[in-house]
Amino acid sequence: MAQENLNPFEISQRQFDTAAEKIGLGDGMREVLRNPKRQLIVSVPTLMDDGSVKVFTGYRVQHNLARGPAKGGIRYHPKVTLDEVKALASWMTWKCATVNIPYGGGKGGVACDAKKMSRAELERMTRRYASEIAIIIGPDRDIPAPDMYTDDQTMAWIMDTYSMTMGYSSLGVVTGKPLQLGGSAGRNEATARGTLFCIREACAVLKKPVRGATVAVQGYGNAGAISARLLHQDGARVVAVSDSKGGVYQSRGLDPAQLDEHKQRTGSVVGFKSAERITNEELIEVKCDVLVPAALENQITLRNASRVRARVVAEAANGPTTPGADRVLRDHGVFVVPDVLCNAGGVTVSYFEWAQNMQGYFWDESAVNRELERFMKRAFHEVHELGKRHKVDMRTAAYMLAVGRVAEATRVRGLFP
């Protein structure tokens, strides 16, 4: 088997190039759209609890601003690199354009092991990182949000740091905040709920009801755990889940509420009663109707794509499937709902939160969920119809739609000076 390139930024560029070729994008426009607009690397010195000072490396990348301010999460992970952040920023550009919200793509991260840091250390690191990137963020410039190992408290620290720097309270500088600081009802479940809406539509296309469908979820963090719960409520049977320490399988089905309680008590889904232990790799190959990758990039590759036995792959994570694996899945008749569509519920409700902050008028959760469903269903059907019309898979169709929208905005704006 040929060696597969797993560099996330190069993968994102290959996905862009495929769509650019399909829509006949000119060379000059391709160069503009495939390169990040702005890349910031910062040193983040942090006072640790033992009195020592540790210097972390932080990043913030703004990929494209043609359709509005940059939008994208901040992740804390030991393996954060500039190429990963560049890839994630570009995926955010296409994600925002796919669901047609007025944002460009951004992303940030700090290379650290958040699991081994105290709350006080995380706060000090977050505030220093926020002060370093404050020169390029703002409610009309770049609006961060939570991502891997960051949460509403992280956003509260960033919002407060930015506000103290500016001299006034700026609720709209971040989204995914606590409700007390202008957060939106429904934001915590938004990524998972958007994934649910896409799975419902994909199952309808395949004439396979969600009720009774078997589901495997890789990654039992916010998106994965809530996806499992929502799918269970829809009548699906969750047969396998996993987190960073491993996974569990039970053909009769797992109860997400009991799993949540077990993970809260033990720190992992591993060891859940009456379930067989499996690895993350084995979970990808579980026989099921719906596979939900909700962890890291490059989980479905040329190495294992031929052994995926799901009918639908719903990408709640960013970049879980490589281009080579995409071809294999397509040849095997697997319906892939791509990340730029499937997990766009998070950024869509972030857009709602930002709009509420700017207006000073807040919606109740039912209104948020109703609008989210409308946005996600509209985007799904626009992508699906484009795919049918051009006889391409859902990922290529989503990129064709998104790249076309960003290219048109860039063309109308023109080049300055």
Image: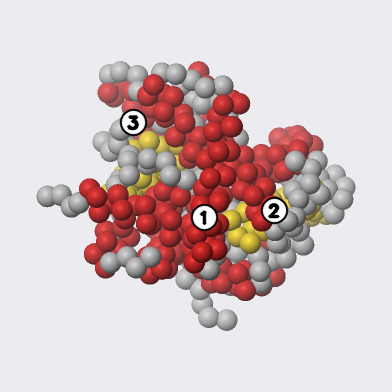
Q: Residue visible at 34% across and 52% down?
A: 406
Is label 1 in a helix, a strand or a loop? helix
Please state which of residues 231 and 8 is positioned toward the viewer in this rendering.
231
Mark 2 lies on residue = 203
Label 1 to label 3: alpha-carbon separation: 29 Å
Q: Nearer the viewer, residue 220 or 366?
A: 366
**Mark drawn on residue 139:** 3
Mark 1 vs 3: CB contact within 8 A: no
SS category of the residue bearing label 3: loop
Q: Earlier in the sequence, mark 2 or mark 3?
A: 3
Q: Could you say whether the residue bearing mark 2 is in a helix, strand or loop?
A: helix
Residue at the limit of the structure toward the front, as seen here: 389
Tell which circle, 1 or 2, labels the residue nearer the N-terminal end: 2
Q: Position of residue 31 (x, y in %)?
A: 27, 63
Q: CA distance from mark 1 to mark 2?
A: 15 Å
Q: Which residue is mark 1?
A: 383
Residue shown at 30% from the left, 33% from the top:
140
* C-alpha separation, residue under disc 2 versus residue under disc 3: 38 Å
Q: How many residues crowd around disc 2 within 10 Å: few (fewer than 14), some, or many (20 or more)?
A: some
**Label disc, if present, on residue 196 of the rendered structure:** none
Q: Amino acid at mark 1?
A: Val
Task: Examine the rendering and report whether any part of residue 44 can be seen.
Answer: no
Is residue 269 depicted above or below 335 in this figure? above
Residue type for callout 3 = Pro
Residue at x 48%, y 57% (from the top left corner): 398
234 in relation to 7, above or below: above
| Image quadrant in which you'd find residue 35 | bottom left
